[in-house]
C-alpha cells in the first residue's frame, strides 16, 4: 500500500489531536471535579445522575413543606394551649361563683371577667399564620368568626387542607373552627355565654350547670391538642426519613458523578507522556528525507 506524504501528515495530526483531546477532557474533569460533564461521556451514568437530581429536588420541596407545616402546627398548638388555660380559668370562676358564699355583686363582677375571656378567645379564633386565617377551614382570607349580638358566628367551612410531604404522603395541618370552637360535642363560645348569662342573672343552678358545658369544651380542646401532637410527631419522623434519603441519594450520585482525583491525575500524566512521545515520533518521521539515504 502506497503511503503518500499527505497521508502521513494527516495521520500524525490526527494522532496528536486524539491525545490532545484526551488531555483536555481530563483537565476539564479536574477543573470541574466531575467525572461526567456531558451525557456522551457516560450515557448510563448521566441518566442515573439526572434521576438522582430530580429526586433531590423533590426531597427539597417536601422538606420546605414540612417546615411550613411544622410552623402552622406549632402555632395551632400554642393557641390551643392558651385556649385550654382560658377555659380552665372559666371553670375556676364558675366553681367559685356556684358556692353559697357568692353574692349577686361578686357574680356580676365575675361576669365581666367571663366576657373578657370570651373576647380573648374570639381573637384567638381569628388568629393568622402568615397571611392566612387558621381556623376558617379552606376560607383563609376572611375572618372566620365574628360577634353578632353577643354571640359568636362562624363564617368558615368544615373543610381542612393538607401538605404533601412525600410522593404519596400528605398530612392535614389545619383545623376548622367548627372542630375547635363551635364543636357540637363542646362549644367554647356557648359555654362561656351561658356562664356569663347565669352570672348576670345570679342563677346559682345555671352556674353549676355551665360547668358541664365548660368541661365538654375542654375535652374537645384536649382531643384536638392530641391530634396536633400526633401530626407534629409525624412531620418529625418524615423529616428524619427525608434527610436519610437525601444523604443516600447524594452518596449514590457522588459515586457515579464525582471525580477520583488520584486516578484522573495519573491518567493525565500518562497522556502527557504519550503526547510528548507522539510529538517526538512525529518530529523524527517528518524530518526524514530520501536525501538522508543517498550516499
Image: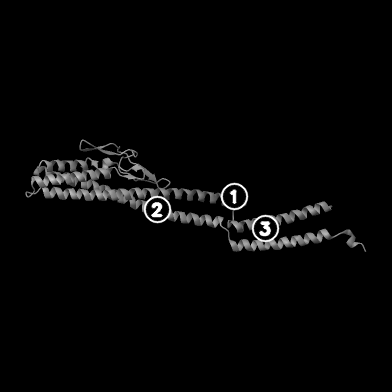
Q: Quadrant of the C terminus?
A: bottom right
The foreground one among 211 and 35 is 211
Q: Residue 230 in the image: state x and y as whole percent.
A: 31, 51
Position of residue 118 in the picture relative to residue 159 (left or right):
left
Q: Answer above or below: position of 164 versus 23.
A: above
Mark 3: which secondary structure? helix
Identify the residue at image location x=51%, y=56%.
Answer: 252
Instruction: Give the CA separation, mark 1 to mark 2.
Output: 33 Å
Residue 185 visible? The answer is no
Q: Are marks 3 and 2 in contact (CB under 8 Å)?
A: no
Extreme residue in the right direction: 295
Is residue 256 at least partly visible in the picture?
yes
Q: Nearer the viewer, mark 1 or mark 2?
A: 2
Pick whichever of labels 1 and 2 is earlier in the sequence.
1
Q: Residue at x 38, y 45 (%)?
A: 163
Q: Quadrant of residue 212?
A: top left
Q: Which residue is mark 2?
A: 239
Q: Measuring from the top left, give residue 4's x and y in whole percent.
A: 84, 52
Residue situated in front as seen by the camera: 211 or 284: 211
Element marked by disc 2: helix
Residue under label 3: 23
Report the side of 126 relative to 49 (left or right).
Answer: left
Marks 3/2: CA–CA distance: 44 Å
| The label number, if any, that marks residue 43 in the structure image | 1
Decide which of 151, 160 is in the foreground and name it.
151
Tell me which residue sits at (68%, 61%) in the image: 271
Residue 1 x/y as whole percent: 83, 52
Question: In percent of the image, x 24 and y 45: which residue is there?
Answer: 121
Count of residue discs: 3
Which percent across, then down, holds residue 128? Answer: 33, 44
Q: Is residue 90 left or right of residue 20?
A: left
Count neighbours of disc 2 (C-alpha within 10 A) and say few if under 14, some if 14 to 19, many if 20 or more.
Answer: many
Amino acid at each position: 500500500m502506497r503511503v503518500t506524504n499527505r497521508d502521513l501528515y494527516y495521520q500524525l495530526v490526527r494522532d496528536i489531536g486524539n491525545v490532545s483531546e484526551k488531555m483536555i477532557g481530563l483537565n476539564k474533569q479536574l477543573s470541574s471535579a466531575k467525572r461526567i460533564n456531558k451525557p456522551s461521556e457516560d450515557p448510563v451514568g448521566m441518566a442515573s445522575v439526572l434521576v438522582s437530581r430530580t429526586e433531590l429536588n423533590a426531597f427539597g420541596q417536601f422538606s420546605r413543606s414540612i417546615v411550613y407545616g411544622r410552623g402552622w402546627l406549632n402555632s395551632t398548638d400554642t393557641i390551643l394551649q392558651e385556649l385550654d388555660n382560658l377555659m380552665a380559668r372559666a371553670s375556676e370562676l364558675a366553681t367559685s361563683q356556684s358556692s353559697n358564699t357568692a353574692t349577686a355583686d361578686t357574680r356580676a363582677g365575675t361576669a365581666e371577667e367571663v366576657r373578657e375571656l370570651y373576647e380573648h378567645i374570639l381573637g384567638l379564633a381569628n388568629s393568622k399564620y402568615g397571611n392566612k386565617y387558621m381556623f376558617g377551614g379552606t376560607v383563609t382570607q376572611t375572618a372566620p368568626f365574628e360577634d353578632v349580638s353577643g354571640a359568636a358566628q362562624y363564617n368558615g367551612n368544615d373543610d381542612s387542607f393538607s401538605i404533601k410531604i412525600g410522593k404519596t404522603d400528605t398530612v392535614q395541618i389545619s383545623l376548622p373552627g367548627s372542630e375547635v370552637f363551635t364543636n357540637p360535642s363542646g362549644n367554647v363560645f356557648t359555654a362561656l355565654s351561658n356562664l356569663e348569662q347565669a352570672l348576670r342573672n345570679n342563677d346559682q343552678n345555671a352556674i353549676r350547670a355551665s360547668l358541664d358545658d365548660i368541661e365538654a369544651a375542654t375535652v374537645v380542646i384536649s382531643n384536638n391538642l392530641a391530634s396536633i401532637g400526633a401530626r407534629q410527631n409525624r412531620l418529625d419522623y418524615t423529616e428524619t426519613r427525608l434527610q436519610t434519603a437525601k444523604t443516600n441519594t447524594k452518596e449514590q450520585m457522588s459515586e457515579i458523578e464525582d471525580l477520583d482525583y488520584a486516578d484522573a491525575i495519573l491518567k493525565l500524566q500518562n497522556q502527557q507522556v504519550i503526547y510528548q512521545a507522539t510529538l517526538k515520533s512525529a518530529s523524527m518521521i517528518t524530518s526524514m528525507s530520501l536525501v538522508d539515504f543517498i550516499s
